Structures are given as structure tokens and as C-alpha cells.
Image (cartoon, rainbow, N blue to C red):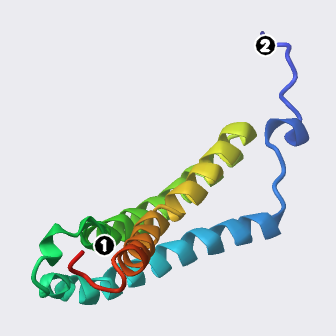
Amino acid sequence: MADQAPPSPSRSRPHQHPAVVVIVWVFGGGAGLGWLSVALMALGPLLFSAMLFDAPGSEDNPYLWVVVGSLLALPILSLISAVATPATVLVSQLLHRRGSTRAGWVALAAAVLVACLPLLALAGIAAGFTLANTLCDGSFSC
């Protein structure tokens, strides 16, 4: 064991282009700051979500409940994404530096999925309003 040569520098650590590192960190930081601002801005519509139920009979409209549930989920999912996206980007970069490129790419894919998590709430808001408008003829008391 003492007569083994140390591994060559080119084989011990895979090379990652510096532009890729910059792009990945800009994505992670940008997604984190972007979703943090969305979480703060989503609190405004959440305050007025009770006004959706002003019309008599609107409390029985399931599409409005989808909208309210999505409005409740948006700040929570945005905060989760704002914290978890840069964290998974960091894990991805650490795995790349340690030589586990496949696990690094999997962690980077997980960062993209975590960054897209609040889009589910935005889709719920859009779907709820669209269904309430089309199926209930624009009336909230359906």
C-alpha cells in the first residue's frame, strides 16, 4: 500500500467549467430572492381572500375554496422554495467538488424542482378563478 502512487490531479476531481458554476449560483440565489419577494407580496391578496365569500351562497363554491387554499399555500411554498433552492444548489456544488458528478446533477435537478414548487399554488389560483368564471357564469355564488 505504501508503494502506490497518489492519484493524478486530473483524475481525482472532475473539472467543472467556471461559467457553469456562476450560472448555477445565479439561479440558486435568484430563485431564493425571487420567491422570497413573492412570499411577501402574496400576503396582500391573502388578507382580502375573505372577500371572495361576500356573495350569498359563495361559501358553497368549491372553486373559490381552491383559490383560497392556493392563496394560503403560496407564501408557505414560496418560503420553502426560497430557503431550499439555494441549499440544494450548495449541496449540488459540494457533490461536484467531491467527485460525485451524477449525484451533483441529481441534486441540481432537485433544486430546479424545488424552485418550481410555488408554481403549483399559482396554477391553483389561476385554475380556481378560471373554473369559477366559466362554470359559474362569472358569479361567485355557484
Q: Residue furthest top?
A: 1
Asked whether, in this view, residue 142 is left or right of residue 51, the answer is right
Label 1 secondary element: helix
Identify the residue at image location x=73%, y=38%: 102
Identify the residue at image location x=16%, y=68%: 60
Q: Which mark is residue 2?
A: 2
In the rendered image, residue 121, in percent from the top left (x then y), is placed at 40, 67
Asked whether, in this view, residue 106 is left or right of residue 81, the answer is right
Residue placed most toward the observer, 34 or 141: 141
Check disc 1: other Cα within 10 Å, few if <14, some if 14-19, many if 20+: many
* Displayed quadrant of residue 69: bottom left
- Quadrant assignment for the N terminus: top right
Q: Earlier in the sequence, mark 2 or mark 1?
A: 2
Label 2 secondary element: loop
User: Where is mark 1, residue-wise?
Assistant: 67
Residue placed most toward the observer, 18 or 49: 49
